Amino acid sequence: MSLAPRPVRFLHIKDGKTYTSLYGKGDLSITPAKVPLFARWDSEDQFIEIRIASSFIQTVAQETLDINPDHLELVPKFRTRDPQIEAIALMLLGELQQESLGGKLYIDSLTNVLAVHLLRRYAVAHSNLSIDQGGLPQHQLLQVLDYISDHLDQDIKLVDLAALIGMSQFHFSHLFKQSIGIAPYQYLLQQRIERAKQLLKQTDQSIMEIAFSCGFNSHSHLSKQFRQFTGITPKAYRTH
């Protein structure tokens, strides 16, 4: 599952079939055991990879869901969204990073929940590789993402983004959310916060200067949005 703040171009070759797409935060791939897989991405990426032993999945299928494991097969996915898997993955990641007391039991519990969810939603007798369709064409999406990245310090309006690729605002918003998983305004705010985090760590600019260079209209505006995203203030993040 991707954790990248900005989507990256991703290539998968699964069982001899090739798929390419932009992978954004929360996008995930499901690969059953014994399916040959090659993956490549063309820019810096962050992701979490969870591997579950097929024997464990089979045990859960038989003991918990009363499914005959001999006839069990999971549906491979190249790029899809699943809020439950995303939540479980982030909880697993948080637990591994904290190394809390009782962590092993907590991880085992989450793994069981994940296995049951995979079986309920993705288990079939026979399956073919599938890829979710929809969203903006990749070249148009890249054009919009590059525009946002290059103009974070400016007042970017939905009408401007839609006009870039000659669409109505409504149509653009719908297709953008299909492509990225979040609305344009949410993505814009996310990118402004990511840029602010970068500047706080890598430069000596004042928080006021950083606020303006990232498109916020004041120190307090940046602080409010930054705290909502990260749980701490820009000042605390810089000294953390």
Image: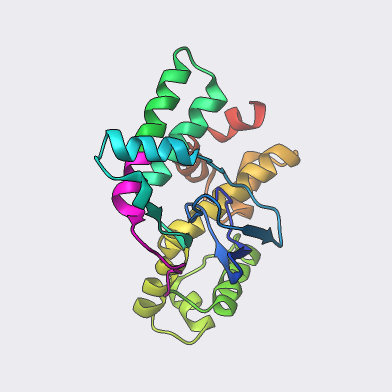
Q: Residue furthest left?
A: 66
Give whichever of 179, 239 is nearer the camera.
179
Total labels: the figure holds 0
Residue at horizontal 59 percent and vertical 79 percent from the top: 139
Question: Toward which corner of the image does residue 202 lie, by quadrant?
Answer: top right
**What percent of the width, then of the height, locates residue 36?**
61, 58
Residue 226 in magenta? no
Question: Does any portion of residue 2 appear in the rendered image?
Answer: yes
**What percent of the width, then of the height, locates residue 186?**
43, 57
**What percent of the width, then of the height, locates residue 231?**
47, 32
Residue at horizontal 67 percent and vertical 39 percent from the top: 200
Image quadrant occupied by the C terminus: top right
**What percent of the width, then of the height, locates residue 46?**
62, 47
Give whichever of 80, 38 is nearer the camera.
38
Residue at horizontal 47 percent and vertical 52 percent from the top: 26
The part of the chain drawn in magenta is 115-133
State left or right for residue 5 relative to residue 62: right
Give whichever of 99, 77 is nearer the camera.
77
Question: Toward which corner of the image does residue 143 lie, by quadrant?
Answer: bottom right
Whether 88 is drawn above or below 122: the answer is above
